Structure formats: C-alpha cells, structure tokens
Amino acid sequence: MEQYNTLFIGMDSHKDSISVAYAPDERTAEVIFVGRIGTRNSDIDKLVRRMQSKARELIFVYEAGPCGYSLYRYLTKKGYQCYVVAPSLIPRKSGDRIKTDHRDAIQLARLMRSGDLTSVYVPRSEDEAIRDLSRAREDAIHDLKAAKARLKSFLLRLDIRYDGTANWGKAHLRWLSKITCPTQAQKTVFQEYIQAISQHTERLDHIMVELHEIAENWRLYPFVEAYQALRGVKFIVALTVAAELGDITRFDNPRQLMAFLGLIPSEHTSGSKRRLGSITKTGNSHVRRVLIEGAWAYRHPAKVSPAIRARLESLPLSIQNIAWKAQLRLCKRYRRLVARGKNKNKVVTAIAREVAAFMWAIAHEVKQTG
C-alpha cells in the first residue's frame, strides 16, 4: 500500500451521516471517495485509523453548518488539524448544476489541498455558550414584537384604536386593560394575545438577568467593559461584539475587521473605471446590526453624559482617551457628511464602520493593560 506524507480529508457532514473523501498531497494524485460513515465518535475513530494507514499527517475539513463545531473539537482534542470553512466562500463553477454529498466531499478535499478554502473562526465552548444566550435574547425580542403586532392587528380589525402617542407605555397598558371585545370568541383571542405578550416579556427579562450574571465571570468580560467606553456601545452591543467575534485582536488591522463585518463598500473596477456600491453585508450580521444601531448616537454633539462617565470610571486612562477621540471624530464626521447631502442611513453605516475600528484599538489596549 502506498504511503503518503499528508492526506487532505474532506467531510460533508449531516445530522445522521458524513460523506468522506481524501486527496493525497501529490498534486497529480486522484481524489478518492471513501464513502459514508456515521456521526458517532467511534465512527470518527474508525475513519482516523483507516486514514492513518495511508499517511503520516491528516488534515480534516468540513463546511460550517447546523451541526456546529463538535466534530472540529473532537478531532482537534485528539491532536489532528481540522478546519471549518465558510460555505459561501467555497469556489464553485458557474455551470455546475449538480450537487451531491459525494461531489461535495471530493471538492472539499481537492480545494483544501490547493489552498483555496477560507476557514472560519471557531469559538471556545464557553464563548459559544454566551453567544447562544445572546442570540436567545434576540429571538425573545423578535417573538415579543411579533406578539405585539398580532394584538395590534387584531384590535385594528375590530376598529379599536389607541389615540395615545406612546405604545406599550403605562397609559397604553391601562387602555388595554379596559378593552371589551364584542363576542366571547374574540374575548378569548384578546386574552391569549395579552398572555403571550406577558410571557415573552418575562422570558426576555429572565434572559437579561442571566446574561448579566454569567457575563461577569466570562473570560472576555474585560473587553465587554472596555467597549462600553464608546458612545452608543452599551452592555448589549459590547456583549454581542465579544460573543460573536471573540478576541478581535486576532485581526491584523481594523480594515480586516471592517471587511469581515461586511461594512466596507462593494467594488467593481475594470480598467480605468472604479465603481463603489453598497456595503458587502458579508460576515456576521448580528454584530453589523448592533453597531449600526449604536452609531445613531453620534448624530448628537460630542459630550460625556453621566451614563458614559459611570462606565468610564473603572477603565484605564488610555481607553478613556480613545473613547473621547472617537466621539470628537465621529460626531464631526456625521455632521460633515449630512451637510454634504449624504443619506443619513449611509452616514450611520460609515460611522458604524469606524466604531468597529475604535473597538479594535480598545481591544489592543485591554490586551496590553491586562
């Protein structure tokens, strides 16, 4: 049996099975499809033993997907190299209209051998747990909004309208408590919708309490505290950035971080013509959303409010200086771009891009002072 130095093993992973192919390190060698195996650890061990008989070094690769990172963690724990790649960045032929597990496994092995795959950042288990809790909060907010929209639509169909200025405030809740529906069936619907809103509100409050308690003992909590020195970056924004991206000092420069978040303009350049379009919107949408929401705070003049001052008290002077420099620059930049007639949404997106750069600088300060 021929012995290779390295095998590149492509795995198309699913819930109940994994399709496997391997490519020897010799460029001219044919990519071999091994077959389909199970997803249990014993199945993975059997595959490893089989591949070890063919090469001294094994490099595994599979696509990021709903099955998570358990396969990556199991293989790396056993000392093997494993990469999780972004499905959207896998090169594909435009005319190829056939997709099978067999082909996907072979393609992964071949592209890994040629170095044409882009791996994704794999968070630690504890970081992923915080991220899951943060995303559960987003889900709770979406469910609460949907429940409120259903209730408002139901009342509108009955021609029951609220004339106040603020929805879901104390006055609005008092008004809801006095509503009487015309039929028993509609009374039941109304009470069910009210109950759903109460349940989602309690669920959101519970998740927020858990987030604050668990985050205080998290290894990245110093980053969460430091990010809040910036205007428009409160606890949720800071936590979302840390939970989704981990330690952002892994990016070599702020431009890499901006590009990863999809906050840079798309570009089409050909010859002497250079055309910039809307932002690329690649990468992590959760972080991009919270940064753009927080960037609206820079439409006001620069100042240190009591809330910001309270967040700054326990932080080093170097981080406070970065936060004030960010305020001066970004507030001025917002006014200047709006004065030039730029669309406010585009201006805020540009501000969010620079907020990410200042967060990168703050993260480096935390590393140095920590």
Image (tube, helix red, strand yellow):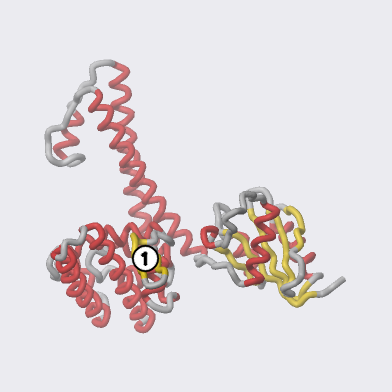
Residue 285 position in % (x across, y down)? 39, 57
Please tell me in which quadrant of the rendered image residue 248 appears: bottom left
**Label 1 sits on what residue type?**
Glu
Could you tell whether 92 is left or right of 145 in the image? right
Q: Quadrant of the C terminus?
A: bottom left
The one nearer the camera, 43 or 325, is 325
Residue 102 position in % (x across, y down)? 70, 53
Q: Residue at x 40, y 70 (%)?
A: 220
Residue 175 position in % (x across, y down)? 16, 31
Task: Work out whether residue 212 can be spotted.
Answer: no
Could you tell whether 332 is left or right of 194 in the image? left
Q: Pick out the residue farthest to the right.
A: 1
Q: Which residue is mark 1?
A: 216
Number of numbered markers: 1
Please tell me in which quadrant of the rendered image residue 49 appears: bottom right
Q: Quadrant of the N terminus?
A: bottom right
Task: Work out whether residue 288 can be spotted.
Answer: yes
Q: Residue at x 20, y 30 (%)?
A: 177
Residue 153 position in % (x across, y down)? 27, 30
